[in-house]
């Protein structure tokens, strides 16, 4: 998945597990950038009575680099507090929740937003209400209106939201993790020398009807750039790098009767995410936990995995004869400069006409966004590969088909960007898991926070 259960240790700590990161120029407010960090993977809507919530003991951060060194220049920190109206009941709510201050809502969360810039911390807002989870039509009627009330306008023309949303990332997990058995190409797949299937089939969205918890912030572009205002598309100062992290304090102590825990010591990073699928299919199993603890500026040590990714080597093995040119590239040990550019440095000017999101020579996994590129009209879910320069890998929008885009890149479609002599295999431009944005049952919103209304436990099919 984009970053769901991507490393051994963080898969055991879902409230700190960053699942997806989005960064894009807001289509309805193009003088702002929207940043969305999702946590808590694979939320079943009916998961009560202890419905999902952010961790009170986790420091959530969205980081912005605006001087191309792979270190944060601006960080938005989010900390949460849970309160119980009635500790004597097992119920999440004792009646319908009609407003964010409803006395029927027993277990509620509030949060504080802090901006850190040049080492100086400023509390932008405190005591902001999260919405409840979407329980069902009796407990949370008019949920869309209730959640919209949890969109807060705070200092500096900033909007924030933190709460449950429908999972907007679509992927056929069952196919991808079954040795890359992509259903549209099943007749071409070989397992241990034997053809397993005889015909193609449509993809199956494994995340349909699942929820996540989103932290979303919409910020004027002028507050994110080192120069205050972006220049032209070709101006490197128009580009920001974004990643999200989660951190826990170094020590946790239980009291004598185990009724309370106390956290102390400095915060230690336990999760990070920028470009989708990196820690899943680029970083090897033995390095995944280490990668989660480091800043992007330290990613040089992982550069060899981007230059010769295991997924690219695996495709010709699983699909014999389908990717002959890719197989030759892999056998020659050719470094994938195209993937290094897309994922570690940004794409320099002159490679894609009218586009660049280059941040310089520092190798760092960041979601790079050129803020001078306006929203696509009409947008393409294939982003830059589809001719829409406002989409992934220029940032990432909620509907971008990052699985297809990255599969095609790993299959060799993007090699000619840096090596005109290479001819991609015909199948490389067709490879997909067979899903589109229409595979998301909730759809998406055309306004902040853009991800759809979460599914309720009562209405969601089993």
Image: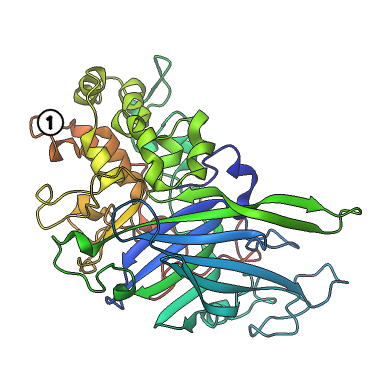
Q: Secondary structure at mark 1?
A: loop
Q: Locate residue 213 relative to residue 322 in the image: left or right.
A: right
Vertical side of 255 occupied by 222: above or below:
below
Instruction: Count up the numbered dots.
Output: 1
Residue 411 visible, this orientation:
yes
Horizontal side of 143 relative to 232 (left or right) equals: right
Q: Position of residue 363 (x, y in %)?
A: 31, 42
Q: Is residue 380 left or right of residue 81?
A: left
Q: Position of residue 233 (x, y in %)?
A: 15, 63
User: Which residue occupies 80% across, 70% down?
Assistant: 91
Residue drawn at 23 percent across, 26 percent down: 326
The percent position of residue 252, horizontal first and vertical second, equals 74, 51
Query: Residue 210 occupies which quadrant of the picture?
Result: bottom right
Q: Quadrant of residue 236?
A: bottom left
Q: Is residue 444 left or right of residue 240?
A: right
Coloring applied to the structure = rainbow
Residue at the top extreme of this rendering:
193
How dense is the environment of label 1, judged by Cα within 10 Å: few (below 14), some, or many (20 and up)? some
The C terminus sits in image quarter: bottom right
Q: Position of residue 89 (x, y in %)?
A: 86, 71
**Which residue is labeled 1 in the image?**
423
Say whether residue 446 is visible: no
- Residue drawn 74% across the image and 61% down it: 50
Name the residue nearer the viewer: 93 or 371. Answer: 371
- Which residue occupies the foreground of this view, 149 or 401? 149
Foreground residue among 373 and 154:
154
């Amino acid at each position: 998945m984009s970053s769901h259960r991507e490393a051994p240790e963080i898969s055991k700590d879902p409230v700190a597990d960053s699942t997806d990161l989005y960064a894009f120029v807001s289509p309805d407010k193009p003088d702002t950038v929207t940043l969305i960090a999702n946590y808590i993977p694979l939320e079943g809507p009916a998961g009560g009575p202890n419905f999902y919530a952010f961790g009170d003991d986790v420091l959530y951060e969205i980081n912005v680099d605006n001087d191309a060194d792979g270190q944060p220049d601006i960080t938005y920190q989010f900390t949460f507090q849970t309160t119980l109206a009635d500790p004597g009941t097992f119920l999440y709510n004792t009646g319908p929740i009609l407003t964010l201050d409803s006395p029927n809502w027993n277990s509620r969360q509030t949060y504080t937003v802090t901006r850190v810039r040049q080492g100086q911390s400023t509390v932008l807002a405190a005591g902001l209400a999260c919405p409840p989870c979407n329980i069902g039509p009796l407990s949370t009627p008019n949920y869309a209106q209730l959640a919209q009330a949890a969109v807060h306008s705070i200092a500096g023309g900033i909007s924030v939201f933190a709460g449950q949303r429908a999972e907007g990332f679509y992927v056929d997990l069952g196919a991808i993790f079954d040795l890359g058995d992509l259903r549209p190409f099943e007749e071409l797949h070989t397992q241990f020398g034997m053809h397993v299937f005889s015909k193609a089939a449509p993809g199956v969205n494994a995340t349909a009807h699942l929820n996540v918890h989103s932290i979303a912030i919409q910020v004027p572009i002028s507050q994110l750039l080192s120069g205050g205002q972006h220049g032209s598309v070709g101006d490197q100062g128009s580009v920001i790098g974004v990643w999200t992290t989660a951190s826990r304090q170094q020590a946790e102590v239980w009291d004598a009767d185990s009724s309370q825990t106390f956290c102390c010591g400095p915060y230690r990073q336990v999760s990070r995410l920028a470009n989708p699928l990196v820690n899943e299919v680029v970083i090897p199993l033995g390095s995944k936990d280490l990668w989660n603890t480091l800043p992007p500026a330290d990613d040089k040590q992982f550069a060899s995995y981007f230059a010769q990714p295991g997924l690219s080597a695996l495709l010709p093995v699983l699909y014999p004869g389908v990717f002959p040119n890719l197989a030759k590239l892999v056998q020659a040990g050719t470094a994938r400069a195209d993937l290094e550019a897309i994922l570690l440095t940004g794409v320099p000017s002159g490679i894609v006409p009218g586009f660049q999101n280059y941040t310089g020579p520092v190798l760092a996994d960041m979601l790079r966004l050129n803020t001078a590129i306006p929203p696509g009209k009409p947008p393409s879910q294939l982003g830059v590969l589809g001719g829409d320069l406002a989409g992934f890998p220029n940032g990432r929008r909620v509907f971008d088909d990052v699985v297809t885009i990255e599969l095609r890149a790993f299959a060799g479609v993007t090699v000619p960007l840096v090596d005109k002599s290479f001819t991609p295999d015909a199948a490389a431009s067709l490879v997909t898991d067979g899903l589109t944005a229409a595979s998301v049952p909730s759809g998406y919103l055309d306004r902040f926070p853009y991800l759809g209304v979460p599914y309720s436990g009562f209405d969601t099919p089993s």
